[in-house]
Image (tube, rainbow, N blue to C red):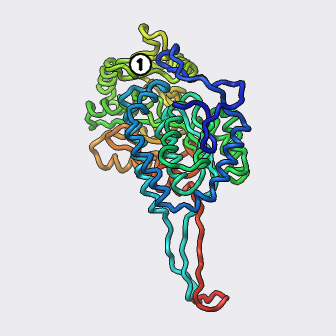
Amino acid sequence: MHTGSYINGQWIHPQSERMVRNVNPADTEDVIAEFPSATAADVQRAIEAAQAAFPAWKSTPGPERGRVIWRAADIARQRADEIARMMTREEGKVLKEARGEVLKGISLLEFYAGEGFRLHGKTLPSEARDTFTYTIRRPLGVVGLISPWNFPWSIPIWKSAPAIVAGNTVVFKPAELTPATATLLTEIYEEAGLPPGVFNLVVGPGSVVGEAIVASPTVRAVSFTGSNAVGSALYVKAAARGAKVTCEMGGKNAAVVMPDADLDKAAVAIHGGAFGSTGQRCTATSRVIAMAPVKDALLERLVENAKKIKVGSGLEEGVDMGPAVDEKQWKTDLDYIALGQHEGARLVLGGKRPEHLSRGYFIEPTIFDQVSPAMRIFREEIFGPVLSVATANSLEEALRFANSVDYGLTASIFTQNIDWVMRFVEEVETGMVHVNEPTIGGEAQLPFGGTKATGVGEREMAEEGLNFFTELKTVFINYSGKAERLLIR
């Protein structure tokens, strides 16, 4: 496996004093790699390489661009176990979840490979006589992609594959915590036949690499996934110079459990949504709003299931939940747990590091009961295995609680009552809604994203994800033989 950055078809080690240190969060003595960080000058080189490669890549037919992505899917399938193991080693998620993410990325590659044949436009009737009108989509040019550490394989794919298929050239900044998985994706794109300069990888801090991407007048669009603080500032800077921007940021997702719900099934779904990936998902189920008649019975099931979770290194057989990604996130989790207790919530389970796991950033599955909507653990994104349980007395009250936070990514309801389902779907303030399943999940052909503080700009994945990386051109063909427009009226 390579290390460093990849610019214009070449792997380089930048001339930088800052080092990227890639450490296994399940065992901090396991250093995967150490290499120099990219500089602003390296980013500029990558942008120039992408700009030089753009004319030829733009002129490559869409189906042929799609075939490169299809070959990448085939190569990824052959290297699936290698990718999953690297993801587990550098990010911490258990191997089963990492393998699932690899498959999700391959599905995205397959979907966008087909989109090379479907770069959509419309034919529309003109008001003028003897005039043919239609629209076409054309690539933007150089685009910047900034991805997070929690899904280091699938998110870079759902940003890069549509950008590439649409005919753009890419400068990609992965999270500093997960450069190895980004390197594997870069190797796969190279092997699949992407010409030099079409895809460039620059590894370094957001304050240097990210800033250089966002500030460059050559970069026509920026796609960002990460924190609200960074995303909001990025949006202002990029939009101020006229770039297209999409930002997918936080989530504080609620599962509403109605009195008629199947509690066993609801508990299983909430369990996976809350503690899968150590709660380090923007779609994680971090809040439960249960109706008073079933809350105690549901809580009993949630605690019983959480007690069975085996915490440890994701590479070990039988482990259900891995560590927090790094010391900073681990301390954030512990700080919020202490805050919840201070606010008056009742700590039912967990709340500390497992005693037998001292060399990694592990934390027990944690459940709070008697959480009120005013508490910070109910309102703020924790990004860890911490579940808050609140009680409501009606669907109207549950909706009020669910909608009371700044975020609006996803939500679930558990019920057999179609009236409640439809009311919830209409009134919950989220970009995605699940019925009788966890708040997590997405599919390549379906738009992904949220409302309110969760996101700005167009949705990702699906046709919408491709459209973001294009501009629409309207064409008028006058075949009347005269220069003027011959209007009907």
Observer-nearest of 265 and 14: 14
Q: Residue 282: where, in percent of width, then height?
A: 49, 36
Q: Is residue 99 left or right of residue 476?
A: left
Q: Position of residue 479 (x, y in %)?
A: 58, 87
Q: Reply above or below: 155 against 139.
A: above
**Dot 1 lies on which element?**
loop
Residue 141 left/right relative to 351: right
Residue 72 visible in image: yes
Relative depth, front residue between 19 and 229: 19
Q: List the residue tagged with mark 1.
A: 313
Amino acid type for the residue under numbered disc 1: Ser
Residue furthest to the top in view is 355
Is residue 192 positioned above or below 315 on the image? below
Res 401 visible = no
Which image quadrant is residue 79 in? top left
What is the number of callouts on the image? 1
Q: Quarter holding the C terminus?
A: bottom right
On the image, the x and y values in percent for residue 336 come to 53, 21
Q: Residues within 10 Å of mark 1 (few under 14, many from 20)?
A: many
**Residue visible at 48% across and 15% down?**
27
> Which residue: 58% across, 81% down?
477
Q: Position of residue 169 (x, y in %)?
A: 60, 51
Q: Which one is in front, 97 or 182?
A: 182
**Which residue extends farthest bottom?**
481
Q: Which of the two residues, 377 or 477, is positioned nearer the viewer here?
A: 477
